[in-house]
Image (tube, coloured by chain):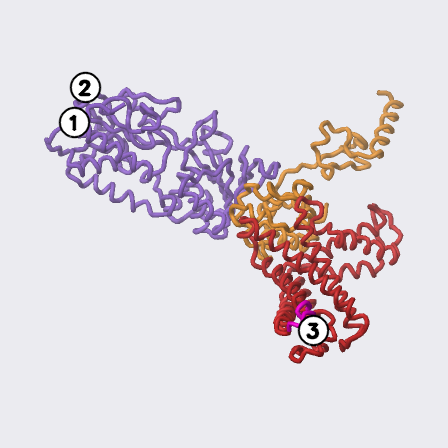
Chain colours: A orange, B red, C purple
């Protein structure tokens, strides 16, 4: 590539970048979550200027620890005491009328990430808990008596109480 | 809990509770309910969001986003957003789950909400216009509307109760506190309507019983509400309104 | 070796729960039994692996095994031959001529028996065959059999002698897998959960994680599963483990949590593998000597898969984990069933096992 072509290429890349979608160049881009794509304006590695297209980074989504602080709080908040009984069968999400309209609200999933203490997942999904309409169909369908309706209430409070830690990076 | 008819002063044994005492009692209960819910919410480790909403509307704050300071949004704009959000989220029942499949549940909640709010307004108007409760020309419309709103409240609570009673799996899994709250609201509405109808038809005993039940249910409601899920619902509603305000009034989407 | 000349005895091969129960029942019928056991002690897997308690109710193993072993060793009708193996079998049903070798003394005994019960039990899968988990290479990776020994001693510690703070149980090691063993071991889920609960009872502050594909706590064993979560706070991750690394201090377990649809790499102090049940050398040997057929999995194949005691060969009956993976309670019942068939045969009540 000639110097002129390189310049032209870089300019085009910058245009496309500033046009909108992050990481447009990633193959199967739709599998990658927006929040994990980092595009620094300037990136230099080992003396080589990697700014622009080659500097697009994708953060790993590996869960690295079980941090059960929020779980312990949920157990003590009103109606959250039965969260430990959940065996992730998915009956609650299956009957939830909100989940069918808003798939980002998934009571089974929220209970799992809180019980396991997957903080990165909680950070991504905690806002959805406020979508719960309190209809109680989940608690009616639960085979273990988890009372997911109550657990959603307890988690709403717990997430707000831990707001500082749960803010996006 | 509505403005008494002139008949009230004419029935000999109707003077169970003088009107002024009732007003003081309700005021006291109201203060208690607010304080109790404040302390309960704070014990959860979270802010008292009804206050936060007010303060968000009232205070001005510079906001920075992506390195650029945005011009502070004026009080009027914030108040407009708050009003719009209140109407849309609360009174048009978005927070009651208006988007999801359970229409009847949303309708029941809507009736309870509207019934209670309008009833409170009418009662407040009645107390303000004439604390002593002496008959005047506004009595009848206020009293009648009070009855209608009590009826709406009762209908809403009835829908909520029947919804849970009619399905076996819902019935056995419903928390005792949910039953308690819905039952108190139902009794409050129904007893008020029965009391006034009894008075209209001059059935003294029925009136006295119904009126006692009515007052008792009001007292129980205000004492119980801070410890019920109603506190959580109001907290959550205020929290979401506050977040709507914070994002909307910043000028962005 | 005293043997009363009261007619031909029944030969029971294998001194585990099935064999012991069979021997006891036959003896109580008044018949003679010769009980041949490969190892130097009776009791089979529960004694060999020092089972601390039995599922589902956490009863001490001695409660069941003690009386059985004691009976067989003391009863006049039972002749126990420990450290012995049946080397040859000739003759015909009702008059089997067997040659039993004493492994250590290198002596042979020949006798004529009327019928034979095969109850040769199982072996645990050797997890070194599946290198994913580092068993045999990495410290603090153990099998459920080794954990049971620690639980019996009331001392669960890692190789450094310290109790683990976070333990992972990996289910289905050497089972439900075409590359190792394709069958399900039926009891490993229950046993692992039982052990998880016992670890929590010993070390309440230790975190226990069960990494599972399915939970198969059958019948009344289900209670352990519910209690493990509801009473003991044991955690369940639905997923599989791809690899276990040793960081120099702790074990890094790398897998996928399918309920989160995401990978995890978390540090643990100890990894317990639910090593499955597979047919052992005793079973293969008995099948060779008695010319019994093995099914595609290497277990003894009964004539009809749903009737375990009927080997298809007259006078030879099957019982216990040598036919299919099973629990102690099931093995005991199978021993009893085989004993009944052997006595019926011995007394000429039924010549042939009916079709």
Distance Cα–Cα, label 2 vs label 3: 101 Å
Q: Residues within 10 Å of mark 1 (few under 14, many from 20)?
A: few
Residue at the image point whose x is 78% and y is 75% from the top: B135
Please tell me whether mark 2 or mark 1 is closer to you in this view.
Answer: 1
- Nearer to the camera, A145 or A86: A145
Residue at which label 3 appears: B28
Residue under circle 2?
C91
- Residue C107 appears in view: no
Range drawn in magenta:
B196-203
Residues at circles 3 and 1 in contact by the CB criterion of under 8 Å: no
Q: Quadrant of residue B225?
A: bottom right
Secondary structure, mark 1, is: loop
Density class for disc 3 (Cα within 10 Å; few <14, some 14-19, many ≥20) is few
Instruction: Please rate how many residues cluster around mark 2, counting C-alpha atoms within 10 Å: few if below 14, some from 14 to 19, many from 20.
Output: few
Residue placed furthest toward the bottom = B12
| Above or below, C294 relative to B27 | above
Q: Quadrant of residue C265?
A: top right
* Residue B170 percent coordinates (x, y): 56, 50
């Amino acid at each position: 590539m000639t110097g002129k072509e390189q310049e032209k290429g870089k300019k085009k890349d910058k245009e496309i970048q500033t046009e909108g979608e992050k990481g447009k160049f990633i193959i199967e881009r739709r599998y990658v979550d927006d929040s994990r794509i980092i595009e620094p304006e300037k990136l230099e590695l080992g003396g080589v200027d990697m700014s622009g297209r080659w500097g697009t980074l994708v953060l790993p989504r590996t869960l690295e620890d079980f941090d059960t602080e929020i779980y312990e709080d949920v157990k003590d908040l009103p109606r959250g005491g039965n969260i430990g009984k959940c065996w992730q069968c998915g009956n609650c999400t299956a009957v939830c009328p909100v989940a069918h309209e808003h798939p980002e609200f998934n009571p089974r999933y929220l209970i799992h990430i809180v019980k396991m203490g997957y903080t990165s997942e909680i950070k991504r999904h905690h806002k959805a808990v406020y979508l719960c309409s309190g209809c109680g169909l989940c608690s009616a369908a639960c085979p273990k008596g988890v009372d997911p309706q109550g657990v959603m209430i307890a988690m709403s409070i717990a997430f707000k109480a831990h707001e500082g830690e749960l803010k996006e990076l | 809990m509505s403005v008494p008819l002139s008949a009230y002063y004419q029935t000999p044994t109707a003077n169970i509770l003088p009107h002024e005492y009732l007003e003081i009692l309700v005021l006291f209960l109201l203060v208690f309910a607010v304080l109790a819910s404040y302390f309960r919410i704070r014990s959860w480790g979270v802010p008292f969001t009804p206050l936060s909403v007010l303060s968000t509307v009232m205070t001005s704050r510079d906001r920075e986003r992506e390195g650029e300071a945005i011009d502070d949004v004026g009080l009027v704009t914030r108040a407009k957003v708050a009003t719009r959000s209140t109407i849309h989220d609360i009174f048009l029942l978005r927070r009651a789950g208006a988007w999801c499949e359970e229409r009847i549940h949303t309708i029941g909640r809507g009736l309870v909400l509207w019934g209670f709010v309008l009833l409170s307004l009418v009662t407040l108007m009645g107390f303000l216009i004439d604390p002593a409760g002496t008959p005047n020309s506004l009595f009848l419309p206020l009293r009648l509307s009070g009855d209608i709103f009590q009826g709406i409240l009762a209908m809403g609570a009835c829908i909520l109760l029947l919804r849970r009673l009619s399905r076996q799996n819902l019935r056995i899994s419903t928390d005792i506190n949910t039953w308690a709250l819905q039952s108190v609201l139902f009794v409050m509405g129904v007893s008020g309507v029965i009391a006034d109808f009894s008075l209209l038809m001059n059935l003294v005993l029925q009136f006295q019983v119904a009126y006692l039940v009515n007052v008792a249910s009001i007292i129980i409601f205000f004492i119980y509400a801070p410890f019920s899920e109603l506190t959580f619902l109001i907290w959550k509603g205020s929290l979401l309104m506050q977040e709507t305000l914070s994002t909307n009034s910043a000028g962005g989407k | 070796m005293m043997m009363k000349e009261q007619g031909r005895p029944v030969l029971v091969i294998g001194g585990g729960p099935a064999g012991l129960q069979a021997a006891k029942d036959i003896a109580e019928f008044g018949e003679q039994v010769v009980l041949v056991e490969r190892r130097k002690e009776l009791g089979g897997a529960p004694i060999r692996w020092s089972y601390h308690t039995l599922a589902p109710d956490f009863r001490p193993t001695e409660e069941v095994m003690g009386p059985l072993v004691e009976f067989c060793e003391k009863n006049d009708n039972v002749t126990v031959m420990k450290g012995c193996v049946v080397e040859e079998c000739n003759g015909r049903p009702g008059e089997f001529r067997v040659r039993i070798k004493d492994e250590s003394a290198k002596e042979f005994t020949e006798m004529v028996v009327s019928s034979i019960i095969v109850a040769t039990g199982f072996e645990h899968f050797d997890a070194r065959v599946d290198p994913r988990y580092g068993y045999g290479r990495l410290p603090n990776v153990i099998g459920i059999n080794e954990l049971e020994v620690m639980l019996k001693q009331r001392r669960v510690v890692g190789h450094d002698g310290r109790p683990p703070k976070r333990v992972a149980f990996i289910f289905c090691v050497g089972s439900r897998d075409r590359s190792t063993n394709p069958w399900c071991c039926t009891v490993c889920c229950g046993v692992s959960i039982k052990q998880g609960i016992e670890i929590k009872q010993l070390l309440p502050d230790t975190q226990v994680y069960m990494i599972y594909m399915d939970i198969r706590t059958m019948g009344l064993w289900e209670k352990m599963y519910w209690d493990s979560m509801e009473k003991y706070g044991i955690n369940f991750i639905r997923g599989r483990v791809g690899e276990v690394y040793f960081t120099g201090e702790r074990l890094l377990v790398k897998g996928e949590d399918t309920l989160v649809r995401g990978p995890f790499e978390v540090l643990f102090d100890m990894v317990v593998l639910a090593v499955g049940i597979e047919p052992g050398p005793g079973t293969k040997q008995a099948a060779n000597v008695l010319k019994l057929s093995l099914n595609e999995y290497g277990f003894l194949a009964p004539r009809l898969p749903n009737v375990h005691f009927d080997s298809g060969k007259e006078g030879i009956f099957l019982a216990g984990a040598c036919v299919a993976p099973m629990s102690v309670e099931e093995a005991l019942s199978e021993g009893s069933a085989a004993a009944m068939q052997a006595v019926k045969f011995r007394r000429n009540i039924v010549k042939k096992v009916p079709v």
